[in-house]
């Protein structure tokens, strides 16, 4: 039985890496005594499958993982109660919000997700300055940047990966500095674009940014939807208050 | 300065963490971490491990004290680790101090900065952490508003190199003494930490058993020679005796072992099964200074393993000690752990510090039931003759038997650890290291084509409170020559991978290990020249050490390479691990005569001084030595000198495996 779980990564835990998060989940599942299925072989591992990696330092309201449970022992499991049970075993700021059983053959998160919405707070600038830069960016047909991926340098046109972008006013960062907030939707298929790369193309100096993933999107025949929508709950409402700087 | 008024530095740290490597090591948030309630009436401890988080977080000593202090009503404890170079620079640029990882308070706002010193090469990091805390690095410059700088751990058994920088040393085990120190510091706080009171609180601390306050002692020299280290006041002890807890069963800590959110070394549940070791290896400071042997009851070990696994979510447990296979009933405990029906998923057991003479097929089979972890054996020397000199009395048969056990149970790779630069070592002894490795690979090839052995060689650094404390350490050139000998032999040895430690780092360690108070200025110079993280090869430069020695007018040869004499005053003589100096000297002479000494757990006492001095007998559950052991089993020690020319594989009896 495969269960998909939606969770947050907010506050201090945002400084853990994608690999750290995987290890945290493995241990949380063991502590919550979930009947997780193990791989077979010389070095058996619990079968957890993660979605798109979140860069170290970024926060998120919309992380996902799929957990394979042992069919026999998972028979009577309370899937609706699973998020609360496992959240109690997760560090502050990581909260499992909803879980659903997904049918066999469901595409993996890596395959299904085509875009993410990001909220990016840029320090030491104004909405007007960022707005002007953004206007020029969106007006351009081609925006070339130099970047390094897996050790290879390349020059890429990133304009097609920016599906939507707008300035969402002024913001005060946690350390008191003033800044501007951007909300952008970036494609994750093809040559994907990272939020930091996008900001780098927009603002010439390397500014301090605070990045929050607010949505991941699955393209469902033209209409888009979230892998697990948060029904009536407003985005970001967790059961635990994350330590240090909820959005 | 009161802790209650100190705000968290977190909002100002956040932007810095976005710019440094591995920021997760600075966030705390571990499973098991507490959020202490600070109160001006409580004594606040900042427990600092002066190396990276990855190295420091698993340290059990620090975690034990963290729990014991936080269980008290009158104390709080938080933790800190040395920030890596990138964050150090960011903090200094931003004008921010060293901070705790629990609530991100400034280090300088705590009443005590307590350092865990496991090794000498971290000494410069202690100075750096004190400085980064905004506290004067030299004790004499500190004022009542500054924290008291403490240090404990194995490397403080020679406290003299840091005597001008650390206010208070704790010699030995900390479980009980932290409470006594808390009482003294609480009274000092209650009295208002007034002008001039620092001297008084330090003098009061000097009266606590096991506590050494170097500023309460005068040091006399005659030229280079040390004449005496003597107390300045009658209420200050002439000799500071180490602390040791009598019964490990009363200290089932850590109860809430910290589970980090990011990768660290020894990332597993650790359960200490005994403390102390009487194997009597003459090079081993840990074995000498932690006597007597005190075993944890097997039932308590089982409980700590079961509860710890359930609480932590770990899938691996290490049963720790200086020689875990010596633990009475080890096979039973391992068997119960791997086959515990209540365990969720797979559990593997690792047994660090394995003695080859106690690693039987039975243990191997139990350990290999779950995932196989790495296997390391430490024969330490390449010939029986030299192993007799260092009193590591394991025979080639023992080693090959253990290796056979491991390969037969499915291992295909193992690591052998050796020392070079040992007293009386000849090139034949050195070449014997590779020979042993080659023979182990041959045994392995009968089981698997993949069989390989990593031979890891470290340069021997003599340590205080051991029979080898009088031995002149090999020079860098000599150690390099021996490594050359090894490399030549290893070139022809298929399946043997040779690794060695940098002999230059061994020299720096030698300077710091057996130095007197004058070495403090050398350490300060190395730190001021940027020499932090000296255990990390990318940060280490020997020239910083040799230049500092020259600048202080001190001779490397005099401190490190000469053999010391029986009549000279050793810099650490006013600190006692309970071992009689004449016992150590006789053992040194016995070593030079090539004479071994059996384990005293199961045979009559040699009167080393510890058991009688502390009124603690060795606490062992079993009246008989472990199966398969060559030491302490009443065997003929002459036997091992018959070095087998051809391999005679003895299949050890799987005693107790059924």
Image (tube, coloured by chain):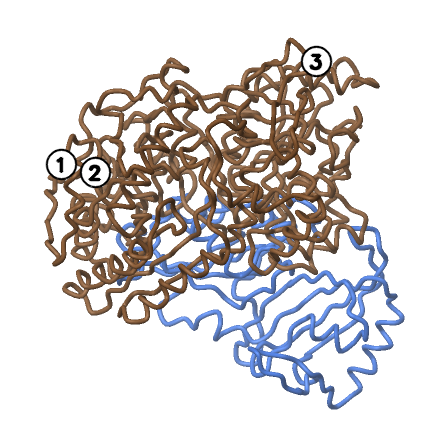
Q: Which mark is residue B187?
A: 3
Tell me which chain appears blue: A
Horizontal side, residue A129 vs residue B356: left or right = right
In the rendered image, residue B119, in percent from the top left (x then y), is placed at 52, 41
Chain bearing tag 3 is: B
Q: Is residue A71 above or below residue B271?
A: below
Mark 1 lies on residue:
B656
Chain bearing tag 2 is: B
Q: Which mark is residue B331?
A: 2
- Residue at left offset 11%, top offset 39%: B658
The image quadrant of residue B583 is top left
Q: Which mark is residue A136?
A: none
Along the line of sight, the residue nearer the viewer: B97 or B527: B527
Q: Earlier in the sequence, mark 1 or mark 2?
A: 2
Q: Are marks 1 and 2 in contact (CB under 8 Å)?
A: yes
Horizontal side, residue B54 vs residue B199: left or right = left
Q: Earlier in the sequence, mark 2 or mark 3?
A: 3
């Amino acid at each position: 039985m495969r269960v998909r779980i939606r969770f947050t990564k907010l506050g201090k835990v945002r400084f853990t890496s994608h690999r750290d998060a995987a290890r945290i989940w493995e241990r949380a599942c063991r502590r919550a005594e979930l009947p997780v299925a193990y791989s077979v072989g010389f070095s058996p591992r619990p079968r957890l499958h993660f979605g798109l990696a979140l860069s170290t330092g970024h926060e998120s309201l919309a992380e996902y993982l799929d957990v394979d449970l042992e069919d026999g022992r998972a028979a009577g499991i309370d899937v609706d109660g699973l998020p609360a049970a496992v959240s109690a075993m997760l560090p502050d700021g990581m909260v499992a919000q909803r879980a659903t059983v997904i049918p066999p053959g469901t595409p993996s998160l890596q395959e299904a997700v085509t875009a993410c919405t990001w909220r990016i707070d840029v320090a030491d600038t104004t909405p007007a300055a960022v707005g002007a830069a953004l206007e020029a960016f969106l007006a351009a047909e081609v925006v070339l940047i130099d970047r390094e991926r897996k050790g290879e340098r390349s020059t890429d046109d990133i304009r097609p990966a920016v599906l939507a972008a707008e300035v969402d006013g002024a913001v005060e960062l946690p350390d008191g500095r003033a800044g501007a907030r951007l909300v952008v939707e970036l494609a994750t298929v093809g040559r994907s674009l990272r939020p930091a790369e996008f900001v780098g193309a927009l603002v010439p100096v390397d500014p301090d940014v605070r990045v929050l993933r607010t949505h991941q999107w699955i393209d469902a025949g033209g209409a888009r939807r979230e892998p697990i929508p948060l029904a009536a709950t407003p985005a970001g409402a967790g059961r635990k208050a994350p330590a240090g700087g909820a959005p | 300065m009161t802790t209650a008024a100190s705000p968290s530095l977190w909002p100002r740290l956040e932007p810095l963490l976005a710019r440094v490597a591995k920021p997760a090591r600075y966030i705390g948030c571990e499973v098991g971490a507490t959020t202490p309630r600070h109160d001006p009436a409580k004594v606040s401890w900042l427990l600092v491990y002066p190396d990276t988080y990855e190295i420091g977080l698993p340290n059990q000593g620090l975690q034990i004290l963290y729990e014991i202090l936080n269980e008290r009503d009158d104390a709080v404890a938080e933790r800190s680790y040395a920030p890596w170079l990138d964050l150090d620079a960011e903090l200094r640029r931003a004008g921010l101090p060293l901070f705790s990882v629990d609530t991100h308070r400034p280090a300088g706002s705590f009443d005590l900065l307590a350092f865990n010193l496991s090794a000498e090469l971290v000494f410069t990091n202690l100075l750096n952490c004190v400085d980064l805390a905004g506290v004067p690095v030299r004790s004499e410059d500190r004022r009542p508003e500054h924290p008291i700088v403490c240090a404990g751990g194995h490397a403080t058994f020679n406290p003299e190199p840091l005597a001008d920088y650390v206010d208070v040393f704790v010699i030995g085990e900390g479980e009980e003494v932290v409470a006594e120190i808390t009482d003294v510091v609480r009274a000092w706080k209650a009295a208002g930490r007034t002008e001039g009171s620092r001297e008084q609180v330090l003098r009061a601390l000097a009266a606590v058993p096991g506590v050494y306050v170097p500023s309460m002692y005068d040091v006399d020299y005659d030229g280079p020679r040390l004449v005496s280290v003597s107390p300045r006041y009658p209420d200050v002890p002439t000799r500071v005796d180490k602390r040791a807890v009598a019964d490990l069963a009363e200290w089932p800590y850590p109860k809430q072992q910290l589970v980090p959110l990011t990768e660290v070394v020894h990332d597993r549940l650790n359960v200490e099964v005994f403390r102390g070791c009487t194997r009597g290896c003459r090079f081993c400071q840990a074995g000498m200074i932690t006597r007597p042997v005190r075993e944890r009851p097997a039932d308590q070990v089982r409980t700590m393993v079961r509860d710890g696994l359930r609480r932590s979510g770990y899938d691996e447990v290490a049963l720790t000690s200086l020689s875990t296979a010596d633990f009475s009933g080890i096979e039973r405990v391992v068997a119960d752990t791997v086959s515990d029906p209540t365990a969720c998923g797979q559990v593997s057991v690792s047994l660090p510090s394995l003695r080859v003479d106690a690693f039987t097929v039975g243990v191997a089979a139990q350990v290999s039931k779950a995932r196989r972890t790495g296997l390391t054996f430490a024969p330490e020397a390449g010939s029986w003759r030299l192993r007799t000199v260092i009193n590591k009395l394991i025979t080639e048969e023992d080693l090959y038997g253990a290796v056979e056990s491991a390969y037969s149970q499915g291992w295909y790779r193992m690591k052998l650890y050796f020392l070079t630069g040992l007293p009386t070592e000849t090139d034949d002894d050195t070449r014997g290291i590779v020979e042993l490795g080659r023979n182990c690979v041959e045994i392995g090839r009968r089981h698997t084509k993949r069989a390989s052995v990593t031979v890891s060689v470290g340069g021997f650094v003599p340590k205080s409170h051991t029979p080898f404390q009088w031995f002149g350490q090999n020079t860098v050139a000599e150690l390099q020559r021996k490594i050359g000998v090894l490399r030549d032999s290893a070139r022809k040895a298929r399946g043997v991978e040779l690794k060695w430690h940098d002999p230059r780092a061994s020299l720096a360690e030698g300077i710091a290990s057996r130095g007197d108070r004058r070495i403090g200025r050398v350490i300060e110079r190395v730190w001021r020249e940027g020499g932090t993280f000296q255990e990390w090869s990318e940060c280490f430069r020997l020239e910083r050490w040799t230049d500092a020695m020259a600048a202080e007018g001190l001779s490397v040869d005099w401190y490190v390479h000469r053999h010391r004499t029986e009549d000279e005053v050793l810099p650490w003589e006013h600190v006692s691990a309970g071992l009689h100096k004449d016992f150590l000297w006789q053992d040194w002479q016995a070593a030079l005569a090539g004479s071994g000494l059996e384990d005293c757990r199961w045979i009559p006492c040699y009167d080393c001084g510890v058991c009688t001095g502390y009124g603690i007998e060795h606490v062992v559950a079993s009246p008989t030595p472990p199966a398969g052991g060559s030491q302490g089993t009443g065997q003929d020690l002459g036997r091992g000198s018959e070095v087998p020319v051809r391999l005679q594989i003895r299949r050890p009896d799987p005693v107790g495996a059924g």
